Image (cartoon, rainbow, N blue to C red):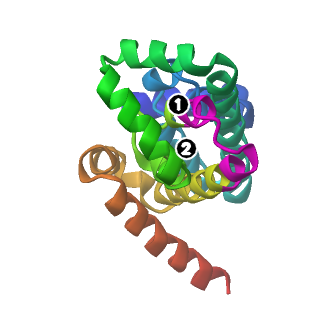
Amino acid sequence: MNILNSILNLFIAYGYFFLFFATALENIPIVGMFLPGEIVVVAAGFYAASGDFNLTIVIFVACAGAWVGTICSYALGFWGGRSFLEMLAAKFRVDGDRLRGADRYFSTHGHITVFVGRYLTGVKAIIPALAGAHRMRFAKFLVFSALGVVTWTSAAALLGYFFGANWPYLIKLIKTAGWLVFLLVAVIAGLILYRRRS
């Protein structure tokens, strides 16, 4: 619970600003690998359940932060070009053959990768940069990035809102069960919320 208490203290001190900047920075290459953005958004959902945050605002602010972060990551890849891509590859020990394979894959499946990449902890900050470096059309990137950001952020916030009281189990679930279970539970939570409000 120490990490939860630390995050809640940051919410008390900085409110929605902390949520925005945490989700934005989580999507910047290298920096994002050390920031547990999904845990921050889950904690914000839990904070909303206690009445200190508004759930709708949590989802909106987290979506805005994450989207801004992905656009910055895309820009880094776009302006850094091939040299930036090779720097990332060297950083993560990806050889030339794999890099060329990534080139071919992005040319045909880039949009799907941008969407699904939202759910892959550890690489979600790199994928927008890869999209930029591969010159994926910006409009297409924006659409699939937005779809991924909205579904991922809503899922994380709803999980925290409904199940945040079981914090240790919830974090273990997120880390071990994978993004499919994460998404399934969030969809169920969203249906429950919809029924309560209608």
Quarter holding the C terminus? Answer: bottom right
Q: Is residue 83 left or right of residue 53?
A: left
Q: Point out the residue furthest to the left here.
A: 176
**Alpha-carbon distance for marks 2 and 1?**
10 Å
- At horizontal 70% and vertical 20% (from top left) the residue drawn is 79
- Which residues are drawn in magenta? 128-143
The spot of residue 7 in percent (x, y) is 53, 30
Instruction: Say above or below: 150 vs 61.
Output: below
Quarter holding the N terminus? Answer: top left
Question: Visible in this render: residue 52?
Answer: no
Residue position marked by numbered label 1 in the rendering: 7
Q: Quadrant of residue 8?
A: top right
Residue position marked by numbered label 2 in the rendering: 41
Question: Visible in this render: residue 141?
Answer: yes
Residue 196 falls within the magenta-colored stretch:
no
- At horizontal 62% and vertical 58% (from top left) the residue drawn is 147
Query: Given this view, does label 2 or label 1 mark the residue nearer the observer?
Result: 2
